Amino acid sequence: MKNLVKNLSTPLIEEFASQLRGKVVMPKDNDYNETRKVYNGMIDKHPGMFAMCVDVADVIASVNFGRDNNLLIAVRGGGHNGGGLGLCDGGIVIDLSGIKFIRVDISNNTVRVGGGNLWGEVDHATHPFGLAVPAGIISTTGVGGLTLGGGVGHLSRKYGLTIDNLLEADMVLADGTFVTVSANQNTNLFWAIRGGGGNFGIVTSFKFQAHKVKTVFGGPTLWPIEKTEEIMQWYHKFLNNSPDELNGFIATMVIPGAPFPEHLHNKHFCGIVWCYTGDMDKAKEAFKPILEMNPLFEHVGEMPYPSIQTLFDGLLPHGYQWYWRADFFTELGPELRAQHLKFGSNIPTPLSQMHLYPISGAASRVGAEETPWAYRDAKYAGVIVGVDPNSKNADKITGWCKDYWEALHPYSSGGAYSNFMMDEGQDRVKASYKHNYERLTKIKTKYDPTNLFRVNQNIKPIE
């Protein structure tokens, strides 16, 4: 049988392990079960081997070993992928968590980051310089996975997606060679990795443009779930006519408990989490129209940027059960709003929720062919997540999530943000890259003709 580490001889494995500065973890090792855990506790894969890399040389050796022995290869950075695509059964996982370094260059406001870093570590390093890189809403997310898929977050309307701020990357390719990609070198590869995922090689280092963001004004506002249709209609018009400095993602959700006040616990809400990056002296004026909508609860104010990035870390720790479904949306019409009210009123567990992240502002002003991220004309990247700490509720949260998605999908743009997708098949991958898929397949064919890197939202080479 192909792709199984167990078919390799012990001397061969030992020889490989001797080539690494990092360590090899095998199923017989005491730390194997801990090592194979990822953010989504619903994922239960059993790799044949982990190569715990600490530098580029380790990655090159691991790629060569996997390729030469016909092993299935998965690549893991932060381990946040919803579908568990940082793991595989029977093959080798090339783990980048030991490749961590951050260097801020204040001469040009750039930051170079290791392939194994988490975004909270980046924020910690950039914040003392009054800088930030646009990236997500959870600080425990890995830099690599979020960046390669696109990168939607609190700063998207002001500074674009994470990929719009990527300046350069170092990569190990399927043949074991090492390259640097940027707007001036290996330009096809540079285009492909800005949204095309891990299909083209393993990124060991990223260089980002950072921006002057130290303090933001933001936080959550909540309305009773019965007001969902009214608030969504207002939100769509208000946000899309607001300056880029104001960002806010809208949600249907249940308040699970602390740190929210007790009278809100276990009740269903339509919520918006805001982030304003403009002049702090003008923040209260900017929030006047929001507060005039009379939220039942609001907790908005001035805070350091890393604080808004960690706002939900405590509610969503490592190891809970997760099931994700996603789509892009251009409008929030009456039929769509009615479905959000219906399913938002029947959220099955306190942490399950739906989010719509805005793609307007700066993120919308990048051409649809400038990066693989094809849906620049969409107003929102939507995601429905079933979440619960108890594995007994896996079917419940999965069923609600699928039903919610099926009700919304007819009103969608057709594809989804790849970082929000499970392992959903080739048609969904094609739909999510739309007119850019053909170019991606050509680049894939050139750099990975055997599809060595296929445990991902896979772009298949031309046969």
Image (spheres, rainbow, N blue to C red):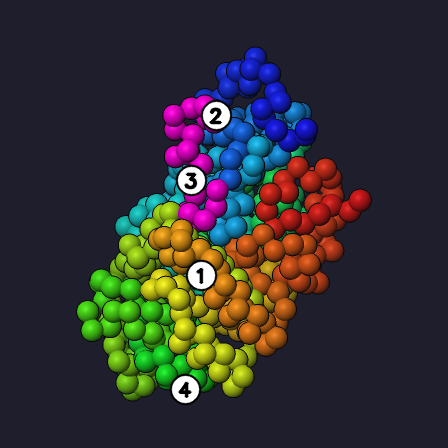
Residue corresponding to mark 2: 26
Q: Earlier in the sequence, mark 2 or mark 3?
A: 2
Disc marking residue 304: none
* Residue type at the position of mark 3: Lys
Does the stretch in magenta take in 28?
Answer: yes
Q: Measuring 39% from the left and 63% from the top, which residue is drawn there?
A: 352
Relative vertical location of residue 153 with respect to residue 455 in this rendering, above or below = below
Q: Is residue 7 visible?
A: yes
Q: Earlier in the sequence, mark 3 or mark 1?
A: 3
Residue 382 image offset from top left, x and y in percent: 50, 68
Q: Are marks 2 and 3 in contact (CB under 8 Å)?
A: no
Residue corresponding to mark 1: 397
Rate crowding at label 4 as few (under 14), some (14 to 19) or many (20 or more) other CA atoms within 10 Å. few
Q: Are marks 2 and 4 in contact (CB under 8 Å)?
A: no
Relative vertical location of residue 133 with respect to residue 261 in this rendering, above or below = above
**C-alpha separation, residue under disc 2 versus residue under disc 3:** 14 Å
Residue corresponding to mark 3: 37
- Residue 260 quadrant: bottom left
* Residue type at the position of mark 2: Met
* Residue type at the position of mark 1: Ile
Q: Measuring 61% from the left and 51% from the top, which residue is drawn there?
A: 457
Residue corresponding to mark 4: 230
Residue range highlighted in magenta: 23-44
Q: Measuring 49% from the left and 49% from the top, which residue is drawn there?
A: 81
